[in-house]
Amino acid sequence: MTIAEIRGKISDTGTNLSERMEDLLTSDVFGCMRYIPPHLALLPFLRTGHSIHGDTLAVPDRPVRVHYAFWPWISQAGRNPCEPDVVIGLETEGSQVEVVLVEAKYLSGISSDEDERPEPNDQLAREVDNLQGLSCATLHWDAHLRIRSRALLFVTQDLGIPRDSLDASLREYRSKRNAEAALYWTSWRHLPSILEASLEGPSSVQSSAAISDMLALLLRKDLVMFTGVQRVERHFSIPTFYSTPVASGYSWPVIPDPMQIKYSYEVSSHV
């Protein structure tokens, strides 16, 4: 059973097919990550996040614990409510938590745009806005935890950063909150190479089944980066026509000359 089903995200009503597919993908991938050490998949995948300025999403090297909240409904005074796909808390020494809110897309785009309301309404800007007022208690994590940093990671299947979407979100948040948003992007396509590298390491023995399943899912959906042209290892024979020795010559068909047709023109009138 997937977390998406537990949370009621894969019902026959209420959402369209593309939304159900991306909810299932999010559930399968991040659900698997809950059961394997974070250094094998979660942390390296989060580090592939970049802002439009090229800054890398910074995450701790050795969190003592990782907290997850899937599709939490966040409603706060003065902010438009939102339901991000997953909120991840990376707990470090001293009961401090670095929070990464993940908004994942697969076949669909951003679900809401800027409007005339004073609060941000663009989906990413709205989620960044709610992220600022988020507490660990809101997410049903240990109440004594203190949030040290907050960032939003936008995950899509794009090969390159969707700059227009990020620019629009950053612009609305800046204009309505007079602040800069910690907004990053990455692609699902970065994950297969991370998983392949993890499978080659000695520390993945206990987690190899979960990692292999995630990798098989992503490969089935063709969520991979272009890795270049593969070297041709096998030789193939050239057709006999092209391997005929030059000395023997070639026999070409005779092509007749085009017909020369003469034309004459005159102006005539008819009564």
Image (spheres, helix red, strand yellow):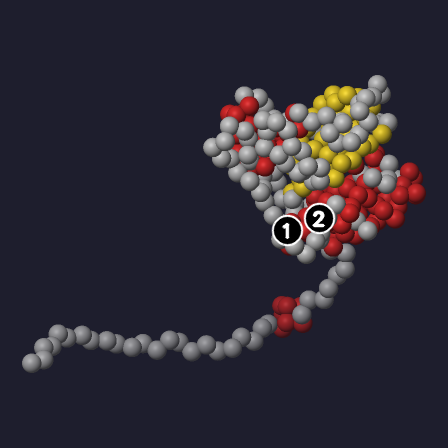
- Which residue lies most toward the front here? 77
Give the residue pinned by disc 2: 9
* Residue 101, x across and y down, in percent: 70, 33
Q: Is residue 233 above or below residue 190?
A: below
Asked whether the viewer can see residue 231, the reply is no
Residue 170 falls in image quadrant: top right
Residue at the image position 59 percent from the left and 72 percent from the top: 249
Q: Position of residue 137 (x, y in %)?
A: 76, 27
Numbered marks: total: 2
Report the disc number at residue 15: 1
Give left or right: position of 213 versus 130.
right
Mark 2 crowd level (few <14, some 14–19, many ≥20, 10 Å Cα): many
- In the image, 144 versus 207, the foreground residue is 144
Q: Earlier in the sequence, mark 1 or mark 2?
A: 2
Which residue is pictured at 74% across the width and 55% down the height? 220
Q: Secondary structure at mark 2?
A: loop
Residue 205 higher or lower than 94, as above or below: below
Tell whether 106 sits left or right of 66: left
| Residue 151 x/y as whole percent | 68, 28
In the picture, the quarter occupied by the C terminus is bottom left
Would you identify the image quadrant in which residue 32 lies?
top right
- Residue 155: x, y in percent? 67, 40
Name the kind of residue labelled 2 in the image: Lys
In the rendering, which numbered label is found on residue 123? none
Residue found 70% across the figure and 43% down from its top: 188
Question: How many angstroms separate mark 1 from mark 2 (CA)?
Answer: 8 Å
Q: Judge by depth and name the residue closer to the eye, 59 or 247.
A: 59
Residues tagged 1 and 2 counted as in contact (Cβ below 8 A): yes
Dot 1: within a 10 Å radius of its alpha carbon, few (fewer than 14), some, or many (20 or more) residues? Answer: few
